[in-house]
Amino acid sequence: MKKQENITTIKKDSRTEREVIIDIRDLYKSFGKVRVLNGFNLRLHKGENLVVMGKSGSGKSVMIKCLIGLIKPDSGYISVMNNEIKTLNRDTLDILRSDIGFLFQGSALYDSMTVRENLEFPMRRHKKRLGLVSDTTPMVLEALESVGLAHAIDLMPAELSGGMKRRVALARTLILKPKIILYDEPTSGLDPITSKEIIELMLSIQAKYGTSSLIITHDVDCARVISDRMILLVDGINYAEGTYEELITSTDPKVEAFFKK
Ligand SMILES: Nc1ncnc2c1ncn2[C@@H]1O[C@H](COP(=O)(O)OP(=O)(O)O)[C@@H](O)[C@H]1O
Ligand SMILES: [Mg+2]
């Protein structure tokens, strides 16, 4: 069975004529008295690597969870590929999610499953989208080859280094050939060399699959290498936007303070 066509219609940005893949407007979210998002806006364009930076606890993960419907915002408009999230029922949200790959903070592998079984897992969950797949091996191998780990197909997670685990997790997000990849702190907990490898993989995946990516990080090096554009989340809003160069040379006190620490 083919995926529903209406899920993939794409809207143009009226100002720039670039396809808008993710559109977040005036997003508000509080937990009790704590106001986390206070009118946040974001647009991700097709093929773009957009980095959102902000200090720890500033609401980056909350924002990304609102985006995929894991957290219900208090108010605001969120659409992904022209589908307004809050209007979707469970099934349509599920179809939309199959177009989105996630690499979340500590996105763990199942320890009791081989690498192959870990990659087959999302295929089972979204088997409607994939149709009948009689042999999963070619898809599993292609995803593993994209992260340079085809040889690890029959290993157990315990046999992998931290960097290899992250790469397998990345391969698992690729298995459904997502149009969008969301990365939440993709380099956290990795040493500088392994971080660099992951960043290079993210770039090569974008080149190979033409994905649009939203990357949350507080790794300034990662942001410098990967970003086409950046948003600095301060006080619950998209406080500053621009290229890495523009932000790093900004004389705004809050932007300067962020990069100085
Ligand atoms: N489910 C939740 N319930 C209550 N507070 C939450 C919840 N999720 C996040 N928060 C709070 O929201 C704020 C932003 O968290 P988060 O988005 O995780 O920050 P970060 O920018 O580091 O990703 C923090 O103060 C956090 O404690
Ligand atoms: Mg976070």
Image (cartoon, rainbow, N blue to C red):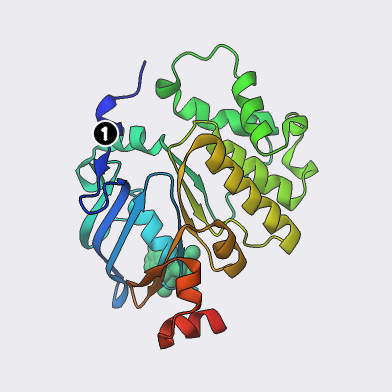
Rendering coords of residue 228 (x, y %): 47, 57
Residue at the image position 69 percent from the left and 60 percent from the top = 190
Quarter of the figure with the N terminus: top left
Is residue 180 placed above or below 115 in the rendered structure? below
Q: Look at the image and tell me whether residue 208 can be seen.
A: yes
Q: Look at the image and tell me whether residue 110 can be seen.
A: no
Rendering coords of residue 197 (x, y %): 70, 52
Quadrant in which residue 7 is drawn: top left
Q: Quadrant of ligand 1?
A: bottom left
Is residue 157 placed above or below 125 in the rendered structure? below
Rendering coords of residue 103 (x, y %): 53, 48
| SS under mark 1 | loop
Position of residue 203 in the picture relative to residue 113 (left or right): left
Rendering coords of residue 247 (x, y %): 46, 74
For the residue carrying disc 1, how many other residues have a C-alpha within 10 Å: few (<14), some (14-19), or many (20+)?
Answer: few
Quarter of the figure with the C terminus: bottom right
**For the residue marked with disc 1, what is the amino acid?**
Thr
- Determine whether the beta carbon of the residue marked 1 sits less than 8 angstroms from the nearest atom of ligand 1: no
Residue at the image position 31 percent from the left and 46 percent from the top = 18
Kindly give the residue lying farthest to the bottom in the view shown: 253
Kindly give the residue lying farthest to the right in the view shown: 159
Q: Which residue is mark 1?
A: 9
Is residue 216 placed above or below 240 in the rendered structure? above
Position of residue 31 in the picture relative to residue 158 (left or right): left
State how many labels appear: 1
Query: Observer-nearest residue: 31 or 79?
Result: 79
Residue at the image position 51 percent from the left and 27 percent from the top = 123
Is residue 197 placed above or below 63 in the rendered structure? above
Residue at the image position 61 percent from the left and 31 percent from the top = 143
